Each structure stands twice: as structure tokens, then as C-alpha cells.
Image (spheres, rainbow, N blue to C red):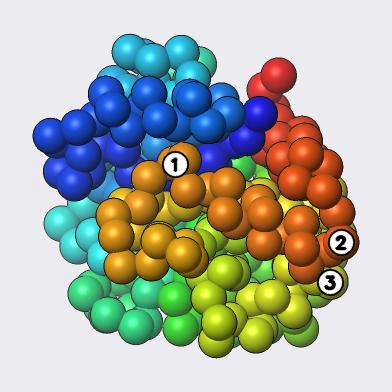
Amino acid sequence: MIWDTHAHLDDSAYTEDFEEVVERMQSAGISRVTNVGCDLPSSERSMKLAQDYDFIYAAIGIHPHNAEGITDETWAKLLVMAKQPKVLAWGEIGLDYYRDRSPRVLQKEIFIQQIKCANEVGLPIVIHNRDAHQDVLEIVKAHPPKYGGVFHCYSGSWEMASVLLNLGFYLSFAGPVTYKNARHTVEVAGQAPMDRILVETDSPYLTPEPRRGKRNEPTFVRETVQKIAEIKNLTFEEVAFQTMRNAETIFRIK
């Protein structure tokens, strides 16, 4: 029983074979998936998937790539969706200085606004952080999420991870922890306490070894579970069980 805590099953990559993807996932013991929004349309699609499938849950929010053009109507719609019972988190939100598709000042403003929204409706946050470690850290210190949060696909140093853990955050690991050059990510996974780790695919992106180069899907989260088990000298079943419990804790669901 594994929870893929971050996927994008509403992506067009699954248009042709969505039901087959779902069948493979269930056959492989992936019992829950959180489908994560990146803008208003994808948040709406995530909520629809959560309504249509009992094992899919939703997160809603605005990715930093999409920080421009946010209107009062956007916020109003997101706040309404956030109150639906199968919406478990506000995300993915944060900063992305790698692609810089939105002005950095605006990224920060939208990030802070969404932390405030999550606090208002009582949801944890899911954070996207790419090449923006210091600014992300400063923002979550200055504007702490009242209901906790997850750093999805964690890519920072152990030094930053230790600060985040002390602030109460969970760290989620995806396919990159299986890559041969992922020395820092493996170090963090090895030192982070097992009760603060989540697993995810970020599918259709970040496919783990040995399937790297192909489209990712929730079934492949098993590779991440196995890698963490190897790093921490635990069994596959122990990691699957604990990461499921951790997801239930942060998302406040049984």
C-alpha cells in the first residue's frame, strides 16, 4: 500500500491510456494518488479526478511558472475548491528560478498570498523549489504555514533540509533519488528521519531508474520506495508503510 503524493494524471500525456495507467497502478499496490494543480484549469481537473475516483485526492494552487495574470476571480474559485473534502493541500506553490517563466518579484508575491490562503482554509502547502533555496527559506520562515507543508521532489542540501525539518516540514522524494549523480539527494534521504519522508512520482516527469527516458506514471513510485529502503537499510514494506502513515498525517486523512 503506497501513496504517490504528487502526480499530474490530468496531463495530456495520459490522454490515450489513462484507464490502463490506473489499472497498472492499482495492480502494483499504489492505493492512493494526490493529483496536484499548477493553475486554475489543472486544479479544476484535479478536483474532478478526485470526485470521479475514490483513490485520487487533489491539491489546488498556482505554480510559480503561472504567477502572471492571477485575478480576484482566480482566488475566489480556488478558495471555494479548497473547501471540498477531497482537496488535501494547497499546491504546488513556490519559486522557480531555473526557468524564470514569471518575474521573480511576482513569484514571491503569489507564493506568499497562497500560504495565506492555505492558512485561511486550513490546508497544508506543497512547495515547488527550484534554484531558489534561500528565498524559499526566507519566505516560509516569515510566513509559516499553520497546517504544515511538504517540499516536493526535494533537491536541496542536507543543511537546508535540517532547517526545514526543524520548522516542521516533510520532505518528498521522487525519481531523482534513484539517479547515479544524485549524491546530495541520497544524503538527505539517508539522514532525514523516516517519519518525515514522503514518496512521489511527479509523473509524467522525473521517471526513475531503470525506466528513465520514458513517461513516468504512479506505478513507478515503487522504484523510489525501493531506493529509500536501500539507503536506510529497511525493507520495501517498512518504507511503504511509514510513508503512507506520514502522508496520512500531513494530509490529515485515514
Residue 102 falls left or right of residue 208: left
- Residue 136: x %, y % from top left: 55, 73
| Residue 87 visible in this rendered orientation of the protein | no
Mark number, residue 191: 3
Residue 35 falls left or right of residue 122: left
Where 83 sits versus 69, above or below? above
- Residue 28: x %, y % from top left: 53, 32
Q: Which residue is mark 2?
A: 233
Tell me the distance, in whole angstroms, between the alpha carbons under discs 1 and 2: 24 Å
Where 188 sits versus 93, above or below? below
Where 228 sits versus 57, above or below? below
Q: Tag 3's secondary structure?
A: helix
- Quarter of the image holding residue 252? top right
Residue at image location 38% in from the left, 23% down from the top? 23
- Quarter of the image holding residue 218? top left
Q: Are marks 1 and 2 in contact (CB under 8 Å)?
A: no
Mark number, residue 188: none
Comes first in the chain, label 2 or label 3:
3
Residue 64 falls left or right of residue 250: left
Q: Tag 1's secondary structure?
A: helix
Within 10 Å of the Cα at label 2, are there few (<14), some (14-19), or many (20+) other Cα atoms?
Answer: few
Could you tell me the amino acid type at mark 2? Asn
Could you tell me the amino acid type at mark 1? Pro
Residue at image location 71% in from the left, 19% down from the top? 254
Q: Which residue is mark 1?
A: 218
Residue at image location 36% in from the left, 27% down from the top? 22
